Each structure stands twice: as structure tokens, then as C-alpha cells.
Amino acid sequence: MDEDMLFGDLSDFGDIDENLLRAYLEGEEVNPELEELLQNYRHDNTPVITRVPFKELWENCITPTLSQTIENVIPLLLLCFVFKLVCSFSKSGSDDNDIPPWLIHFSSLMFGILALQLFFQRTLIYLLVCALVGYSVLVITNWRNRDYCGIVMSLCIVAYLIACEFVLERTVWHSIRGAQIILSMKMIGIAFDLSNGTMIRFPNLFEYLGYAFCVGTVIFGPWISFNEYKNILNQHKRPLSFFWLWKVISSLLASLVFVVCSTCIINWLILDNHWKWFKAYRSAQSFRFSHYFICCLSQVTLVMSGLGATHNNDDVKWDMHIARPYYIELPRSLVEVVTYWNLPMHYWLKTYIFKTTKPLGTFAAVLLTYVASSLLHGLNFQLAAVLLSLGFYTYIEYVFRNKLSKIFNACIQARSCKDCYHEYKHNNPYVIAANICFGFLSVFHLAYLGLMFDSSPGEESGYSMNHTLDKWSALDFSSHWVALGTYIFHLLI
Amino acid sequence: MEHVFYDDNYVNENLWKEGKQRMFNCTDFHGNLFTCRCRESAFIYALTSAAVAHSVARACAEGSIYTCTCDYNLKQPDGKDWEWGGCSDNAKFGHKFSRKFVDVIEKGRDFRYMMNLHNNEAGRRHVTTEMKQECKCHGMSGSCTIKTCWMRLPLFRTVGDLLKDRFDGASRVLPGRRRRRKFTLLPANTNHKPPGKKDLVYFEDSPNFCEKDTSIGFTGTKGRECNATSLGIDGCDLMCCGRGYKSESYTVRERCSCTFHWCCQVKCKVCTRTKIRHTCL
């Protein structure tokens, strides 16, 4: 055999240039040689990932999600509405008191227990026990020394949470955790109010239990203050109105949109074969939308039961917002994300934790706030890791952007400045560009932090530590490195 | 009916995939393997009925069949652990349809028909049990206060792979007691468990597929290409059943040492190579 035949004609180059490639890809020109070449490049056994038709998505995901959500939520909403009607019968302040206040509080408790029964069945006993233990702690500390009320209560709650973590089955605990957080926040709030003198009159058992199990907040939250709760006695000042109905309906619709986006649409738009950062963004966004869903739903239950309004003379404004998705999806900074994530919770953390620990220094206070927040969530490595990371990130971001804004005399702090004295205001193109860049940085951090809430099999019982670390190491811990880099840069300038 | 025609492609595609490395090469058959009672026919029965079930379910989900019943009113008994509340019936409908459409051919009462029915059912079961339930939790800070779930049809490729595993582990059965009009299937090896609902069963040992067998329409392995270095079933020793093989060399001109140049060029040399092809005698 000819040597040349065996080893090929080396001078014969087959160049495939860009135009040819493009022509092929656009299907203009069928080039068998090129096709063959591309075939060689194609792997044989990669599973084909395609986007299912929308009709199928609609039938297999959107419809069931909607119907399941509505089916679960309708009884709760009815309970809230009936509770509001019951409250409207009470005319506090006037002489013809139809229903005594204790009965209203008692009915609040009863409706709350009914709602808990709907969602958690027998597990609700743990919440009841927690509330009762909490009340005895209140009574005892109030009798011995009022000043320690808040601290003692916090310690008791943390101990109770940790005990639950070990005693209860993981799935069970994971399902009531949300309700437990709200309950703990209410109890600690009352305790601190008592110890720092904001609340002078000691609440009786009916008021306390009515507040703790108020039907509008008991399942999905939000946290409300005891003072806001007492408005259930003033329901005649908050009659059923168009604005009330509008608030209920718009929040409900928003919540449904969010739940559909979270479960179906986001996973449909970004497929499994996309870039790993897109997938991280997808998981994180799906988690965020699920959170907005819960926030909107809690808004519905709250407003439905006649709470969450502000009074302006005789005007009632139903303007309660739990979360601000807009500021989280298109963030200015992580500091804002943390604030708008859950406004009542943010207020609670600020009032009861941050202000209490402020004397220890800002950094320590910020850190302790995040520690408290993660303790509230129980002994969950994943949440603790995310929250502590957020604590560091927000601190770094805050100091770094503060420094930058002083150096450049521009409005680029973490929070937009209220009365801006900077030379470059927020409408300056450079300032806008800088803020957008910081916004992207926040989106990057958020994708990284929210990545592991990805509905994988561990979801129902809470994720394990390995799950978190696996997910993060798949992204090379890049966001932590970036944060560290930012901090070092901050120290250098 | 067009959906069922579409199945044929499905089946062929899969048989082609599964059979490529094996001695029964699907292109060599002309549809008569159905009459054999061996392992391979068990596989074909299962795959066919699975394909019918799968493609009908899929067509239902895509909305191209309007007669599918879609019952959304599946009531959930418990508050929290509710079952699937969507159109679960697509899979059920596919299952039922396949049962009617495929099993109807098996009209006899003898053991062989029972076996075929068993294999058909096994194939369909793989479709319905591989339906993936996917759930998502919603609640404060990632807790699981409420859960929403939905179902997803498996890829047919997955079903095919599972059936292939069952093919490898298929058990030989003998007719057991006759109960009313049904036979029980007893494992031929008494140490084995009776076959489960998803197991494939066969009665006769497979023909060796070496020689031409007109009764099952098999052309034999004569002329099949084989791999001289492989010790497996695609190797020349086994494939040609010891008849030996002939080797011939041929030359091809093909692209080689391709390199990618930024951006976007692929430069290749064209080599003329001599290759050797082995075919069974």
C-alpha cells in the first residue's frame, strides 16, 4: 500500500470558515462534510433536554399548583373573614358593648387553633405548649424582676427550639417551623416590651393567647406588634370597604402568580443544561418567589382578618407590605434586600435585637442580629450559613460603599440617601452606572446564597450541611471570595 | 390512530438502540419475532405496550387527543399529605388505552397469551410507575408549611433502559395452576421468586440467532459486521457463532486532527485511512 494513502495527504487542509459554519447553522446551506464533522463532535449519550410545550406545562404544573394552593388556602381565608365579622360585633369604647373583649380574644385563639388544626393537625400541640410555657415565664419574670423579662424569654425560646429540633421528627418540625418562628417573635416581642417599659399593662391570658394565635398571622405570619393586634377590638373603625377588598384580591392574585412562577415558570425558562450560574440563579429565584408567595399570602390573611391598616384621622389605609419583590429582584444593595425581604421581621429584628445589642458596637450588633435570626430558624446549618454570610456581606457592603461614596462624593451608599448632600446625585450617569454594577454584584451574591434551596429531596425535612457545602463548592465558594476581596479592598483604600 | 403509528417509530428506534450491540439486530426481523416465546419477544411485547401507553399519555398531555379524560377532581383525603391534584389521568388513560389496544390481540386462553399479557402489563407499569412526582415546599424561611406537587411523564428512553435491565434479568416460567381462566406463572427454577408485576417472563430459551430462522423471520448473523477485538456479544467470536469471519480492508478519506481556532474556525486535515471491516461468514 502506498505510504501516502495510509497517512493521508498532509498538504490537503480542509478549512471550515466562519461563514460556512454560520450558513450551516442557519440552515441555508446543507454541507454534508460539515454535517459529518459536527456529528463527530456531538456526544452520543447526553440526554436531550428540551422545553416542554406550554400546554403541557399548563396542564401538568400550573393547573395542579394553582388548584392545590387554592384548595389549601380557601379554608384559612374563610376563617379569617369569619373572625373579622365576629370582631365587627364588638364596639369597644361605646356603652353598648355587645361582646366583652375577653370573648373576642378567646375567639381569636379558637379560630387560630382551628387554622392550625387545618394545616398541622395534632402537631399544633407543640405550639400551644410553647405559648403556655412562654406565658408562665412572663408571669414569673414579671413578678420577680421585670427588667430580665426579655432576656429570659429569649433564652427559654431558644432552648425550646433546640429541644424541638431533637425531639420532633424532622419532617414534622420542618412543617411547623414557620408558624413557630412567628410565635417566638411575638413572645419575645411582648417580653422585651414589658422589660423596657413600652408595654405597661401586663396582658392577661386571653389577650396573650389571642395575640399568639391570631388567625390572620398564625400560619404564614407576618409578625405584628401587640398594639396592632389590639385593633381587633376596633373593627368598627375598619369597616369592609372597596379598598379592603381590593387589597385582599390584589394580594391574593399576586401570591398566585408568585407560586406559579416559583414552581413552574422559572424552571421552565431556565433548563438543566444551561450554565451553572444560570441554574444557581434559577434555584435562588425560585426560592425567592416562593417567599414572595408566602409574604403575599400572609398579607391576604392579615388584611382578611382586619389587621394591617394605618389610620390617618378617620381614613383607613390598607397599605401593609410584607415584602417588596421589586427591590429584591432588582436590588440596589444587599442591605436593601435584607430590609425588604420581610419588613415586619426586619422591624422586629431592629427593635428587639439590634437596639438591645447596640451598646456592644455596630459590628457586634449586626452580627448578633443575624445570629438571633438564625437561632430563631432553629439549628439549621443551611439557614445559619446563609444568614451569617449575609451578615458579613451586608456589613462589608455597607462600610465599603460608605467609604466609596465619601471618596467620590457620590450617592452610592448601600441605602439611597434621603437628603443627598453629595456632589453627584443619584441621577448622575456615573452614579447610576455604579449603582447598577453594585446591583449586579448583589444579584450574584443572591444567586449564590439562594442556590441550595433547590427543592431537592431533602427539602421536606430540611437540608443537610453537606448539601449546602456541595452546592457552594460546585461554585468554588466564589461569592465568599468576592466578599473577602471587597473587604480587603475596603481596608486598602 | 396517528398516535399509534408514531409509536412504531418509537419502538423501532428503541429496538434499534437496544439491539445494536446484540445478536438480534432489529433490522433483520420482519415482524415475526412476536410468534416466539423467548426472552427477546418478551422484551418486544413489553416495549410495544409501554410505547403505546407512553405516547398516548404524552399526546394527552400535549392536548392533541381530545378524548382523554382529565379528572381534576381527585379529592385529597388528608389536609397536608395530599396527593396529586392535577391531570393524573393522562398516564392512566395511556395505560388503559394500551391495555385495550395492545392486549386485544391476545385473544387466546393458553399459557402463551397469559405470558404475553404479563409482559405487556410489565411494560406499561414501567411507564406509570416512572411518573415522577415533583414537589416544592412553601413556607416562612424555607420551611414546609404547604407543599405543591405535580407529575411528570418519564422519558421513553428511561423506560427503554429499565426494560432492558428487566430483559437481562427476565425469568423463565412454566404454567402453574389454572385459576378460572388464568394461569399462574411459576418460575422454572424453583429457587427463584415468582415473577413480579414488572418482571419480564419467557417460556422458551432464545434461539441462538446464529442461523437463518424463517419461522421467526430472522436472517441470521451472516454478513453482520462484528468487532474482532471485543470479547462481548458484539465480538466476532460470539456474533458469528464460531463460523469465523472475513476481514477486508477499505480506504476512507476522513477529516482528522481537527483543531478549533478562535473564533470560529475548525481546521482539519483530510487523511486517507485504511480501515478493516470484519463480517461474519
Image: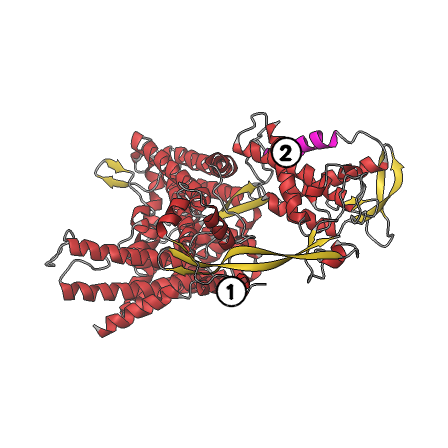
**Amino acid on which disc 1 is placed:** Asn
Question: In screen coordinates, is A202 left or right of A114?
Answer: left
Residue at the far right in the pictured view: B177
What quarter of the picture does the C terminus of chain A occupy?
bottom left
Name which quarter of the figure residue B41 lies in: top right
Give yes or no for residue B92 being in the magenta stretch. Answer: yes
What residue sits right under mark 2 in the picture?
A: B94
Please tell me which residue lies in front, A244 or A481.
A481
Compare residues A452 and A40 and report the one nearer the observer: A40
Residue A440 covered by magenta stretch:
no
Q: In this view, does A169 lie to the left or right of A77?
A: right
Q: Nearer the viewer, residue B29 or A195?
A: B29
What range is drawn magenta here?
A: B89-104
- Residue A16 in percent (x, y) is at 40, 53
- Measured in 3D between alpha carbons, the distance from the residue under mark 1 to the one under mark 2, in whole angstroms, is 40 Å
Residue B202, horizontal then vertical, whole percent: 80, 45
Q: Main secondary structure of the magenta part?
A: helix
Residue found at the very far front of the displayed protein: A2
Say which residue appears at 72% left-offset and 40% top-offset: B29
Q: Residue furthest bottom?
A: A492
**Three-letter amino acid code at disc 2?**
Gly
Is residue A207 visible to the viewer in this orientation of the structure? no
- State the image coordinates of residue A478 (x, y, percent, origin top left): 38, 65
Q: Position of residue A286 (x, y in %)?
A: 42, 49
Q: What element carries label 2?
A: helix
Provide the secondary structure element on which disc 1 rests.
helix
The residue that disc 1 covers is A466
